[in-house]
Image (cartoon, rainbow, N blue to C red):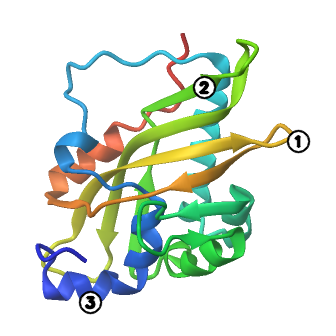
Amino acid sequence: MAAAVSTQMECAMKPFAIAALPMLAFMTVAGAQAPATAPVARMSAPECEVWARELSFAQSVARHDAAAFATHLESDAAFGASRPEPTRARDNIAKRWSGIIEGKRLRLEWYPTRTTIAASADGGVGDIAWSSGPSLFEDLDPKSPQRYRIGAFHSVWHRGADGVWRVLFDDGVDPKPVSEADAVAFRAGRKAQCPQA
């Protein structure tokens, strides 16, 4: 963990840090939270499919469903892609995420605020998409001096031959400490439906 992370928080999160941070790209709080006056991005119907799939991915962690989590991963996915030793392949990623999915010491939440699909060579809808939004870590240790941290994630999704979107790449940096009010605002910012164009 970064030097700014307290020793106690580092100890609490260390088993999860390798798994969580490569999966979700945790940016600075300023980058994670859009201003309240920022216009809402409108997305196409295909982009909203990726949006829904991202929410489903987050729900697999919220529900502690390791099997569902794995179904959201490409078999040859790479997490922590910019790091010296990325985690490669679905089974390895799922294994490293097992503690986070179990959710006994750390609760991880995230949701998309933007998805973008690349165009195909023929000008149609492509099979590669980018998804981003804020993420929240909650340390469940009641003695923790820093309960909440917020970052942001960026995921690259691929639509397979079966038409299903799965995560192909993810990467991350450390989230930043925030207050309980910031955590409440994070949860209030989750949209029930994709803002479709």
Q: Is residue 143 visible?
A: no
The residue lying at 67 percent from left, 30 percent from top is 49
Q: Residues within 10 Å of mark 3 (few under 14, many from 20)?
A: few
Decide which of tag 3 and tag 2 comes sooner along the chain. 3
Residue designated by label 3: 11
Check whether the beta carbons of the residues at disc 2 and disc 1 lie within 8 A of each other: no
Mark 3: amino acid: Cys
Q: Find residue 193 and report its image quarter.
A: top right
Mark 2 or 1, which is nearer the eye? Answer: 2
Mark 2: amino acid: Ala
Q: Position of residue 140 (x, y in %)?
A: 32, 77
Q: Relative to the observer, which residue lies in front, 153 or 68?
A: 153
Relative to 99, residue 51 above or below: above
- Which disc is residue 118 wearing? 2
Residue designated by label 1: 162
- Say what secondary structure mark 1 lies in: loop
The residue lying at 25 percent from left, 39 percent from top is 33
Check whether the beta carbons of the residues at disc 3 and disc 2 lie within 8 A of each other: no
